[in-house]
Amino acid sequence: MRDELSCKRIRPLIAPGAAVTDTTATVSSIIDCQGYDAVTLAFVTGTLSDADATFTALLEEGDNSALSDNAAVADADMVSMTAGTAPEAAASYTFADDGETRAIGYLGTKRYIRLTLTPAANTGNHYVAGVAILEKKSPGVNQLAASAN
Protein backbone atom coordinates (compact mmCIF):
# COMPACT_ATOMS: atom_id res chain seq x y z
CA MET A 1 0.00 0.00 0.00
CA ARG A 2 2.83 2.39 0.81
CA ASP A 3 4.22 1.94 -2.72
CA GLU A 4 0.81 2.61 -4.26
CA LEU A 5 0.33 5.81 -2.29
CA SER A 6 3.79 7.06 -3.19
CA CYS A 7 2.76 6.90 -6.87
CA LYS A 8 -0.14 9.34 -6.35
CA ARG A 9 -0.50 13.06 -5.79
CA ILE A 10 -3.66 14.86 -4.76
CA ARG A 11 -4.29 18.39 -5.99
CA PRO A 12 -7.17 20.81 -5.37
CA LEU A 13 -9.72 20.67 -8.19
CA ILE A 14 -12.68 22.70 -6.93
CA ALA A 15 -12.18 24.47 -3.62
CA PRO A 16 -15.16 24.67 -1.25
CA GLY A 17 -16.80 28.03 -1.52
CA ALA A 18 -20.02 30.01 -1.52
CA ALA A 19 -23.00 28.50 -3.26
CA VAL A 20 -23.67 29.34 -6.89
CA THR A 21 -27.26 30.60 -7.09
CA ASP A 22 -27.58 31.10 -10.84
CA THR A 23 -26.30 29.50 -14.06
CA THR A 24 -22.67 30.53 -13.61
CA ALA A 25 -20.41 27.59 -14.47
CA THR A 26 -18.04 26.16 -11.88
CA VAL A 27 -14.61 25.92 -13.53
CA SER A 28 -11.96 23.82 -11.81
CA SER A 29 -8.30 24.55 -11.34
CA ILE A 30 -6.12 23.65 -14.30
CA ILE A 31 -4.39 20.37 -13.49
CA ASP A 32 -0.84 19.76 -14.78
CA CYS A 33 -0.63 16.08 -15.79
CA GLN A 34 3.07 16.05 -16.68
CA GLY A 35 4.79 12.96 -15.31
CA TYR A 36 1.56 11.10 -14.56
CA ASP A 37 -0.18 8.28 -16.42
CA ALA A 38 -3.75 8.92 -15.30
CA VAL A 39 -5.84 11.44 -13.39
CA THR A 40 -9.06 10.90 -11.49
CA LEU A 41 -11.18 14.01 -11.05
CA ALA A 42 -13.44 13.38 -8.06
CA PHE A 43 -16.01 15.75 -6.64
CA VAL A 44 -18.89 15.82 -4.19
CA THR A 45 -22.11 17.80 -4.29
CA GLY A 46 -23.58 19.59 -1.32
CA THR A 47 -27.26 20.26 -0.70
CA LEU A 48 -28.78 21.36 -4.01
CA SER A 49 -31.82 23.43 -3.15
CA ASP A 50 -33.27 24.02 -6.63
CA ALA A 51 -36.20 21.86 -7.76
CA ASP A 52 -35.30 21.44 -11.46
CA ALA A 53 -31.62 22.31 -11.98
CA THR A 54 -29.25 20.13 -14.01
CA PHE A 55 -25.44 20.24 -13.98
CA THR A 56 -23.45 19.15 -17.03
CA ALA A 57 -19.82 18.06 -16.81
CA LEU A 58 -17.25 18.94 -19.49
CA LEU A 59 -13.60 17.86 -19.42
CA GLU A 60 -11.14 19.86 -21.53
CA GLU A 61 -7.46 19.34 -22.35
CA GLY A 62 -4.58 21.22 -23.95
CA ASP A 63 -0.84 21.82 -23.89
CA ASN A 64 -0.95 25.54 -22.98
CA SER A 65 -0.71 26.23 -19.24
CA ALA A 66 -3.66 28.66 -19.45
CA LEU A 67 -5.58 26.19 -21.65
CA SER A 68 -5.91 28.79 -24.39
CA ASP A 69 -5.73 25.77 -26.74
CA ASN A 70 -8.48 23.90 -24.90
CA ALA A 71 -10.51 21.20 -26.61
CA ALA A 72 -13.08 18.76 -25.32
CA VAL A 73 -11.56 15.44 -24.31
CA ALA A 74 -12.55 12.48 -26.49
CA ASP A 75 -14.53 9.76 -24.72
CA ALA A 76 -11.74 7.31 -25.61
CA ASP A 77 -9.37 9.33 -23.37
CA MET A 78 -11.74 9.26 -20.37
CA VAL A 79 -12.92 6.58 -17.97
CA SER A 80 -16.56 6.58 -16.89
CA MET A 81 -17.59 6.00 -13.30
CA THR A 82 -20.56 4.02 -14.64
CA ALA A 83 -20.08 1.16 -17.08
CA GLY A 84 -22.04 1.69 -20.28
CA THR A 85 -22.50 5.45 -19.72
CA ALA A 86 -20.41 8.13 -21.43
CA PRO A 87 -17.91 9.59 -18.91
CA GLU A 88 -19.20 13.17 -18.87
CA ALA A 89 -22.83 11.99 -18.76
CA ALA A 90 -22.03 9.79 -15.75
CA ALA A 91 -20.36 12.73 -13.99
CA SER A 92 -23.29 15.09 -14.64
CA TYR A 93 -26.05 15.39 -12.04
CA THR A 94 -29.37 17.01 -11.12
CA PHE A 95 -31.01 18.83 -8.22
CA ALA A 96 -31.89 15.42 -6.72
CA ASP A 97 -28.24 14.39 -6.23
CA ASP A 98 -27.52 15.95 -2.81
CA GLY A 99 -24.33 14.79 -1.13
CA GLU A 100 -23.25 12.47 -3.94
CA THR A 101 -19.87 11.82 -5.48
CA ARG A 102 -18.95 11.88 -9.15
CA ALA A 103 -15.70 11.13 -10.97
CA ILE A 104 -14.10 11.16 -14.40
CA GLY A 105 -10.84 9.39 -15.23
CA TYR A 106 -8.41 10.97 -17.71
CA LEU A 107 -5.93 8.88 -19.73
CA GLY A 108 -5.12 11.34 -22.51
CA THR A 109 -1.77 12.70 -23.61
CA LYS A 110 -2.23 16.45 -23.15
CA ARG A 111 -0.36 18.21 -20.37
CA TYR A 112 -3.24 20.21 -18.84
CA ILE A 113 -6.89 19.46 -18.07
CA ARG A 114 -9.82 21.18 -16.38
CA LEU A 115 -13.38 20.31 -15.47
CA THR A 116 -16.36 22.61 -15.96
CA LEU A 117 -19.75 22.03 -14.33
CA THR A 118 -22.43 24.08 -16.06
CA PRO A 119 -25.82 24.50 -14.39
CA ALA A 120 -29.11 24.97 -16.23
CA ALA A 121 -32.27 26.30 -14.56
CA ASN A 122 -30.43 26.81 -11.26
CA THR A 123 -31.97 29.36 -8.91
CA GLY A 124 -31.10 27.59 -5.66
CA ASN A 125 -27.85 26.77 -3.93
CA HIS A 126 -25.23 24.74 -5.81
CA TYR A 127 -22.36 23.54 -3.62
CA VAL A 128 -19.55 21.41 -5.03
CA ALA A 129 -15.92 20.65 -4.11
CA GLY A 130 -13.37 18.21 -5.45
CA VAL A 131 -9.84 16.93 -5.88
CA ALA A 132 -7.65 15.59 -8.68
CA ILE A 133 -5.76 12.38 -7.97
CA LEU A 134 -2.74 12.05 -10.25
CA GLU A 135 -1.29 8.55 -10.63
CA LYS A 136 1.98 7.10 -11.88
CA LYS A 137 2.26 3.45 -12.70
CA SER A 138 4.07 1.82 -9.82
CA PRO A 139 7.32 0.23 -10.93
CA GLY A 140 7.09 -3.53 -11.37
CA VAL A 141 9.65 -6.00 -10.09
CA ASN A 142 11.36 -6.19 -13.49
CA GLN A 143 11.57 -2.40 -13.71
CA LEU A 144 13.12 -2.19 -10.25
CA ALA A 145 15.66 -4.89 -11.09
CA ALA A 146 16.58 -3.15 -14.36
CA SER A 147 17.03 0.21 -12.62
CA ALA A 148 19.31 -1.38 -10.00
CA ASN A 149 21.77 -2.51 -12.69
Image: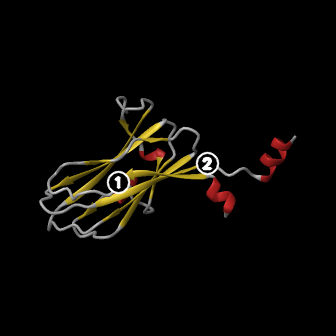
Say left or right for 90 vs 77: left
Q: Position of residue 137 (x, y in %)?
A: 64, 49
| Looking at the image, residue 27 lies above or below residue 93 | above
Give 16 or 66, whichever is nearer the viewer.
Answer: 16
Of circles 2 and 1, the one toward us is 1
Residue positioned 85% across, 43% down in the render: 148
Q: Are marks 2 and 1 in contact (CB under 8 Å)?
A: no
* Image point (43%, 63%), residue name: 82
At numbered mark 1, what does the secondary structure look like: helix, strand or loop?
A: loop
Helix, strand or loop status at disc 2:
loop
Q: How many marks?
A: 2
Count residues near mark 2 (Cα–Cα under 10 Å), then give few for <14, some for 14-19, many for 20+.
some
Mark 1 belongs to which amino acid? Ala
Q: Residue sitting at 52 percent across and 37 percent down?
A: 109
- The residue wearing badge 2 is 136
| Image position of 51 with respect to 115: above or below | below
Q: Quadrant of the N terminus?
A: bottom right
Q: Which mark is residue 15?
A: 1
Identify the image quadrant of residue 48: bottom left
Mark 1 neighbour class, 10 Å CA radius: few under 14, some 14 to 19, many 20 or more: few
